[in-house]
Image: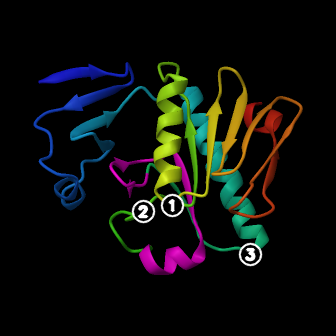
Amino acid sequence: MVISFQQQETIIYPPATSLEEFFNHPLKNAEWVDGKIIEKVGMTLLHSKIQARVSYYWRSYMLSSGQGGEVYTEALCRTNKQGRRPDVSYLDKHLLSQYGNADFLPQSFPLIAEIASADDSAEYLFAKAKQYLDSGCLEVWLIYPENQWIIILTKDKHLLLTLGETATTQVFLQGFSIAVTDLFS
């Protein structure tokens, strides 16, 4: 049985009996949200293009700056209550040495980017960002390709950036910056 959820996700039955069971047997392209297994669907070409660009720019900067670590797409992590797969995430060299060979990260990634799909509500993405920040993430980038906005969230700061401005990491992957125009062009 398949039921539509949030217009972009699909609940897959039967649900996992627990979050721990989900992490012991994770499904590809699926998250565990509020006791249900949710398949991530609805990625458009635009979404995929922005995801690839963020991954490329973060990884290029990570390597050129010598900060080390790794950049992931759709990697499974645990928040305080959910099993999530952020669109793009960065793991510094210290956490990489500790968890680099694990099947999933047992906490939120320190730096995460979520790219809005046409069907995502702002409220839904802000709720995800709050889950990440409440679970050890230090910085979340919410990227809205249709509006060409980047919203950067930390525990202490919220920034809204658009064309003609420069997005800069606030807490993690120190020194990274990109012209918003370059990300969306």
Dot 2: element: loop
For marks 1 and 3, the one nearer the N-term is 3
Q: Is residue 166 above or below residue 138?
A: above
Residue placed most toward the observer, 17 or 52: 17
Can you identify the residue that label 3 sits on? 66
Tag 1 and tag 2, C-beta contact below 8 Å: yes
Q: CA distance from mark 1 to mark 2?
A: 7 Å
Q: Is residue 33 above or below residue 146?
A: below
Instruction: Please name the residue shown 16% across and 51% down the image.
Output: 18
Residue placed most toward the observer, 149 or 66: 149
**Disc 2 residue type (three-letter):** Gln
Q: CA distance from mark 2 to mark 3?
A: 24 Å
Can you identify the residue that label 2 sits on? 107
Dot 1: element: loop
Which corner quadrant of the image does residue 37 belong to?
top left
Query: Is 97 one of the magenta-colored residues?
Result: yes
Q: Position of residue 176 (x, y in %)?
A: 78, 57
For marks 1 and 2, the one nearer the N-term is 2
Between label 1 and label 3, give the one nearer the viewer: 1
Quarter placement of the N terminus: top left
Q: Position of residue 79 (x, y in %)?
A: 39, 54
Q: Is residue 99 above or below residue 108?
A: below
Which corner quadrant of the image does residue 101 belong to?
bottom left
**Disc 1 residue type (three-letter):** Gly
Residue placed most toward the observer, 129 or 72: 129
Q: Is 96 displayed left or right of 30 in the figure? A: right
Q: Which residues are magenta?
A: 75-99
**Disc 3 residue type (three-letter):** Gly
